[in-house]
Structure formats: C-alpha cells, structure tokens
Image (cartoon, rainbow, N blue to C red):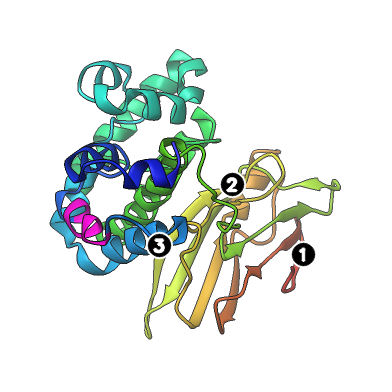
C-alpha cells in the first residue's frame, strides 16, 4: 500500500488501519485531522506532534493496553488478533527463546506491571529474548516518571515501524538513523562491547532523569536509542554505561563500575558518542 492508497480510503477505514499502529483514541482523532496526508513526512510529523504534544498520560496508557506482554503467546493469539501479524513478527525472537527465558520474562513482566501500573513497552524488532529480558530487568530500577517517558519513546518507535509495514510501498528514505547513537569497543580484546546496558539521561538542574535506555547489540551499538526523526532539545545530557556487569560476565574486575559521559546537544544534527573501554581505562570523542 502506498500513501496515496491510504489517502483514497474513507476516513473511518483509514482510522481502522492506523489504529493497528497506535491504539490511543486521542492520537487517532487528532492525527486524522491532518488526513489526507500531504506526504510521508507529513504523516510522521503529525504522528509525532500529536503523540508528544497533544496526548496526555491517559492517552499514552491507553495505547500501551493495545500491546501484548513480551513473550505472552496466549495474548498474542487471543487478545490482539487485529495486530497479530505485526506484533508476532516484532516478537519473533521470543518464539525461539528457552523455556527458562520465557518464564523469567513472565515473572519480570508481572513485577514491572505491579510497580508501574502498565505493561513493559519495548520496540522488540531486532532484539533477542535475552536482550529484552535484560532491558526489562534494568528498567525495573527506574522511577515511574522515567518509565513513562521511556515507554512513550518505545511506543513511537513501534508506531513508525508499523507505518512502514502498513505502507510497504511508501517512500521512507527520509527517515535516517537515531539522532543520538553510540558504539562501544573493548580495546583489551579488540572486539565490540556487547550486552552493555546504557541509559540516556537529561539534566534536570539538580538531578538527572533517564529518558531512553538500551543494550548494545553484537556489534556494540544501539542504533535505535531514540525514535527516528525525534530530536533532543538543546541542553546537557549524559550516557551511563554499566561496565561492571559487562566485565563481570567475562570474569574480570573492572576499575570503573560505570562510565558517565556528559555532552551538550546544540542543534538537530546527528550526534555519535562512542566509548573505547578496557578494565582500567576508557576514552571517548564526538564521532560521526
């Protein structure tokens, strides 16, 4: 389907299709005020503006209820039939996970929902079940406010991904990479630093608040820390790399339990913050 195909639909038909991308009724109503969409860029712009600027906490929580719990196969087949073809593919790595990982995911999901009052939301595409379990466990340590902000970002990533699947013949070439990216290289072994938990935090004056979170992949990267097209406001930020757990997994003692890299966002250009690490030292620079 192309964007032109979508624009030719009756507004109620378009609403039903767009609802498979995000289940917030307020988001849908406000987004359709811009229907028909002038371009793919116009769709993305209005979807993002509506989600972040026109929706409330109640609207975000409503959208979360349209997702199955990670690893919950029963809810995928029964409760979410309308998006099964989308969510099933997004969670395909869970289907090949061990029974122990599935059970651990179920337990962690329950603990998460009991603590925050909503289910764990993550853009699961490209992530292994073990990586999602690691993310879930790490994010359990956040405050509810932090988690709500992170979950909002993850929902927007999912919305964008489902736009691409829905409009599979549209032109999405304008969507590049996350504005902020990172790459960890372990110089002691000459290999990428994989499975390192990283928090992106924003300065709140007297404290720091986590606004995004991820785990490095096999190449030592987190390519989707922020939703595509979502730019950070100018200001001071920092990335917190959980290096102690990384070295402990290799039966090594590292000198730095965490590496905090503070930096300033000046504009909407791309920012790459790499980390070169070994058990007793590290370095960083602004990459490209």
At x 67% / y 67%, what residue is drawn?
Answer: 272
Closer-to-camera residue (88/97): 88
**Is residue 137 in view?**
no
Callout 2 crowding tier (Cα within 10 Å): few <14, some 14–19, many ≥20: some
First along the sequence among labels 2 and 1: 2
Q: CA distance from mark 2 to mark 1?
A: 16 Å
Q: In the image, residue 94 lies at what x, y percent?
A: 46, 23
Magenta segment: 27-34
Q: Return the disc, 1 or 3, that comes first in the chain's sequence.
A: 3
| The quarter of the displayed image where residue 265 is located | bottom right
Circle 3 sits on which residue?
A: 42
Residue drawn at x 42%, y 46% as measured from the top left: 3
CA separation in Å, label 2 and label 3? 43 Å
Q: Which of pointers 2 and 3 lies earlier in the amino acid sequence?
A: 3
Of residues 12 and 113, which is closer to you in this image? 12
Please say whether residue 31 is one of the residues in the magenta stretch: yes
Which residue occupies the foreground of this view, 83 or 7? 7
Question: What residue is disc 1 on?
Answer: 281
Please state, as top left, top right, bottom left or bottom right, where the C terminus lies in the image.
Answer: bottom right
Helix, strand or loop status at disc 1: strand
The residue wearing badge 2 is 245
């Amino acid at each position: 389907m192309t964007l032109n195909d979508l624009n030719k639909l009756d507004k109620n038909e378009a609403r039903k299709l767009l609802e498979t991308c995000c289940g917030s009724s307020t988001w849908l109503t406000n987004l359709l005020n811009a229907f028909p969409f002038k371009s793919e860029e116009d769709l993305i712009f209005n979807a993002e503006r509506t989600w972040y600027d026109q929706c409330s906490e109640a609207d975000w929580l409503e959208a979360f209820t349209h997702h199955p719990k990670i690893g919950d196969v029963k809810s995928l087949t029964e409760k979410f039939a309308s998006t099964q073809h989308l969510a099933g593919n997004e969670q395909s790595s869970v289907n090949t996970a061990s029974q122990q990982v599935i059970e651990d995911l179920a337990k962690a999901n329950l603990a998460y929902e009991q603590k925050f009052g909503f289910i764990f939301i993550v853009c699961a595409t490209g992530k292994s079940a073990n990586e999602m379990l690691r993310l879930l466990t790490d994010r359990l340590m956040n405050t509810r406010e932090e988690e709500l902000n992170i979950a909002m970002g993850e929902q927007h990533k999912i919305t964008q991904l489902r736009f691409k699947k829905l409009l599979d013949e549209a032109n999405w070439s304008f969507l590049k990479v996350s504005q902020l990216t990172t790459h960890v290289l372990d110089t002691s072994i000459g290999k990428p630093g994989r499975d390192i938990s990283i928090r992106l935090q924003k300065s709140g004056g007297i404290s720091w608040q986590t606004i995004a979170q991820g785990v490095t992949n096999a190449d030592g990267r987190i390519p989707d820390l922020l939703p595509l097209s979502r730019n950070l406001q100018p200001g001071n930020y920092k990335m917190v790399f959980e290096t102690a757990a990384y070295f402990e997994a290799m039966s090594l003692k590292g000198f730095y339990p965490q590496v905090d890299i503070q930096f300033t966002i000046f504009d909407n250009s791309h920012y790459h913050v790499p980390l070169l690490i070994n058990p007793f030292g590290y370095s960083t620079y602004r990459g490209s």
